[in-house]
Image (spheres, rainbow, N blue to C red):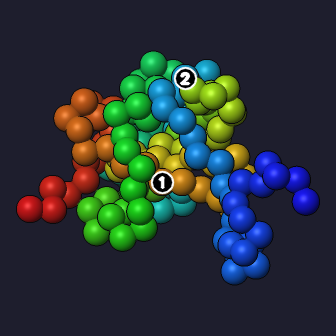
Amino acid sequence: MPIARCIPLLLLAAGAACAAEPLEPFEVFEVGQPLLSMQAANEPGLSEACRNWALSTADAERFLNLSERVDGQTLHQYYNWLPCRIEGRLRDRSGQLWNFEINAASVASLWQQRDDRQFRGCRQSGCEPLVLMMPESGE
């Protein structure tokens, strides 16, 4: 067995997996147009806000670099979800390529394989002009 395994065999037997970790800072090189879900189409005000929301590559890069990784509990407790998102691609510090999705409610996910997403959220004031909704303060 090669020595360069990312986790011990014992952990593999217990069902643990080895997932890559995106390394900051991020360099965004591709950003798509806003994508709306059917829910947004059924709500005229929200639909218009989503269609008018856009991020440049510099905006997306700023958002992702200001954001921090969040666990499921934090995501559920403090962050909302809107039916509009922007997808793109980035390169991390190690040169690895990642897909990303930024939700208009200040949440992002990064992945290399769709079933292994890592969530990020931004509470910093620098993110406010980049999204439609900031997270709840939790205070």
- Left or right of 138? Residue 22 is right
The mark that comes first in sequence, 2 or 1, is 2
Residue 60 seen in the figure: no
Q: Residue at x 26, y 62 (%)?
A: 78
Q: Quadrant of the N terminus?
A: bottom right
Residue 17 sits above or below residue 120 on the image? below
Residue 27 seen in the figure: yes
The CA distance from mark 2 to mark 1 is 17 Å
Splitting the image into 4 quarters, where does residue 9 fall?
bottom right
Residue 71 x/y as whole percent: 41, 62
Residue nearer the viewer, 81 or 110: 110
Task: Count the marks.
Answer: 2
Q: Which mark is residue 27?
A: 2
SS at badge 1 = strand
Residue 3 x/y as whole percent: 82, 52
Q: Residue at x 68, y 32 (%)?
A: 96
Residue nearer the viewer, 119 or 5: 5
Q: Residue at x 36, y 70 (%)?
A: 73
Residue nearer the viewer, 85 or 109: 109
Q: Amino acid at mark 1?
A: Phe
Q: Amino acid at mark 2?
A: Glu
Q: Residue furthest bottom?
A: 14
SS at badge 2 = strand
Q: Residue furthest left?
A: 139
Residue 27 sits above or below residue 135 on the image? above
Q: Which mark is residue 119?
A: 1
Mark 2 closeness class: few <14, some 14–19, many ≥20 residues within 10 Å: many
Q: Which mark is residue 7?
A: none
